[in-house]
Image (cartoon, rainbow, N blue to C red):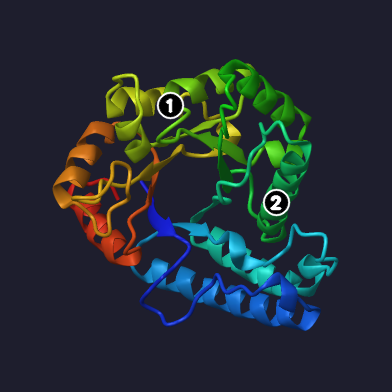
Amino acid sequence: MKLGYPCINRSIGCAANRKFRLASYSEDKLVDTVTNNLDCMHKILKYNLDYDLFFFRLSSDTVPFASHPICDFDWVDHFRSELHEIGRFIIGNDMRISMHPDQFILLNSPDEGITQRSIAELEYHCKLLDAMGLDSTAKVQIHAGGVYKDRELAVERFVERYESLDSGLRKRLVVENDDRLYSLRDCLLINELCGIPVLFDSFHHECLNNRESFSSAMGDAASTWGKGDGVPMIDYSNQQPGARKGKHATSLDIGHFRDFLEEVREFDLDIMLEIKDKEKSALEAIVIMKELGLA
């Protein structure tokens, strides 16, 4: 199993998700910001390699406003060598990469404008991964979207929009169960209709489920991944004590994590740790996985 964390490393003194306001957009500012973000991304990946953290989620803010009409700059060409270098580092060290656009990505929105902006954003994410030379195991995860007072019609729209996407985009997308609207069972139905792999989020499953165990749910989700998709990915977190239901924890609950690993240890999977203190909890988690012979 590979283990990782999303987007930010708090130990190395730089941020790979720097951005700026649309009102201050310029090509110079874009180049300066992306230069910083790629340099820091490389530093994070080197840090992760040193600590056996072989899974990482790249920030959607790597190239600010890349999907906005204001950005007509050919950033792929400008940063070609830097992107290739990062890609070679990832591939050469057998790392796994994913991305997760914000929740404003709504393929099933009744509003065509929202849908088109969502597709443009997904195209940017895939362009970034393509520019690094990463294969189809580098995934972009999305949620099913809204229900819009008619779940059946909302699912139908999702399937229709997904099937209309370019094949290069479809091969990277996975759909994730959420904590309020679309349970694992709903996502499995979407998979049956259009073939999109299902990424299992264990914490969301605790919040919204149909009484499936972790192991049963993981098995159902894993069965939707094909050979070209790579090892199934899973998101893990635990509840923040004393907070509203569904709030991600600041730090790892070691006992909960051990129990979770015992339930899913029969599967070959890669774990994204969605804990707020990022690499701090990831370093604790990788020790536990090694003790259990899972990493």
Q: Amino acid at mark 2?
A: Glu
Q: Nearer the viewer, residue 204 or 167?
A: 204
Side of 68 where 238 appears, left or right:
left
Q: Earlier in the sequence, mark 2 or mark 1?
A: 2
Q: Which residue shows up at 78% across the image and 79% down it?
A: 26
Q: Nearer the viewer, residue 244 or 295?
A: 244
Q: Which residue shows up at 34% across the image and 65% down it?
A: 279
Q: Is residue 149 above or below residue 88?
A: above
Side of 265 where 156 appears, left or right:
right
Labelled disc at residue 183: 1
Q: Provide residue 38's location: percent of width, then percent of height.
A: 60, 73
Q: Which residue shows up at 56% across the image and 51% down it?
A: 102
Q: Are marks 2 and 1 in contact (CB under 8 Å)?
A: no
Q: On the image, numbered disc 2 is attached to which residue?
A: 121
Q: Is residue 33 above or below residue 287?
A: below
Q: Provide residue 221's location: percent of width, then percent of height.
A: 44, 27
Q: Is residue 11 above or below residue 282?
A: below
Q: Provide residue 242's location: percent of width, then percent of height.
A: 19, 50
Tell me the element at label 2: helix
Q: Which residue shows up at 41% across the image and 73% down it?
A: 47
